[in-house]
Amino acid sequence: MLKALVCYFSKTGNTEQMAQKIQQILQEEGLEADLKKTHEIQAKDFLGYDCLIFGSPTYYGTMAWELKKLLDESVAFHGRLKGKTGGAFSSSANVGGGNETTVMDILKALLIHGMIIQGNPKGDHYGPVAIGAPDKRALTCCEQLARNLAKLTKMAAAS
Ligand SMILES: Cc1cc2nc3c(=O)[nH]c(=O)nc-3n(C[C@H](O)[C@H](O)[C@H](O)COP(=O)(O)O)c2cc1C
């Protein structure tokens, strides 16, 4: 069974709600999906997954240090995440508060690892973003990300 990790940091639960939705849809799509907070996992554990999805609240326009630390620690096996699929999501307080730059900062790390990233032409283009707790629109974008990633991960495994 293909394995996905939804790894997130969340202080007040908004990013967590997005993570839970993504996990639920990945499971619906037939993937084994683990939901882990940043302190519940080590970077070396990333090697055991086919798909890696990371979420963080927007802190000063980028990810929280707890997630950045984990990504920095993944340098220990640089190159070995190549070919895995990935995605990112974020919650911020404000529209224009930096949630897209946060998503992009996470995606940059995944791209540098050689991972496979797919944009979304219809929903949130770079990855789901929410203002505070995810509303219906943001949850739909989380669902789209999870369904797209499930499909992409199956394609990558078959190739
Ligand atoms: C240290 C800190 C920095 C923040 N920086 C921003 C910011 O740059 N832009 C913004 O819109 N919200 C900012 N926020 C608000 C959070 O992104 C927002 O409350 C988010 O929904 C929290 O997610 P969580 O419930 O998953 O912890 C900041 C909050 C904290 C604590």
Image (cartoon, rainbow, N blue to C red):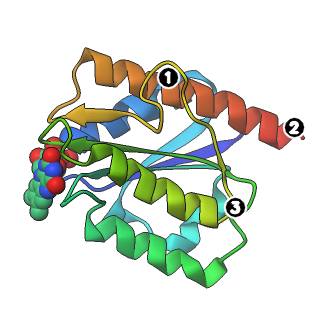
Q: Is residue 51 above or below residue 73?
A: above
Q: Distance between the residues labelled 1 and 2?
A: 21 Å
Mark 3 residue type: Gly
Residue under label 3: 114
| Beta carbon of the mark 2 residue lies under 8 A of ligand 1 | no
Q: Is residue 109 above or below residue 28?
A: below
Mark 2 residue type: Ala
Residue under label 1: 144
Give the residue drawn at x 44%, y 22%: 123
Residue 4: x and y in percent read 58, 45
Q: Is residue 45 above or below residue 14?
A: below
The quadrant where residue 152 appears: top right
Contact? badges 1 and 2 (CB < 8 Å)? no
Residue under label 2: 158
Give the residue drawn at x 57%, y 59%: 110
Q: Distance between the residues labelled 3 and 2?
A: 18 Å
- Residue 55 visible? The answer is no
Residue 39: x and y in percent read 32, 67
Could you tell me which secondary element the residue under label 3 belongs to? loop
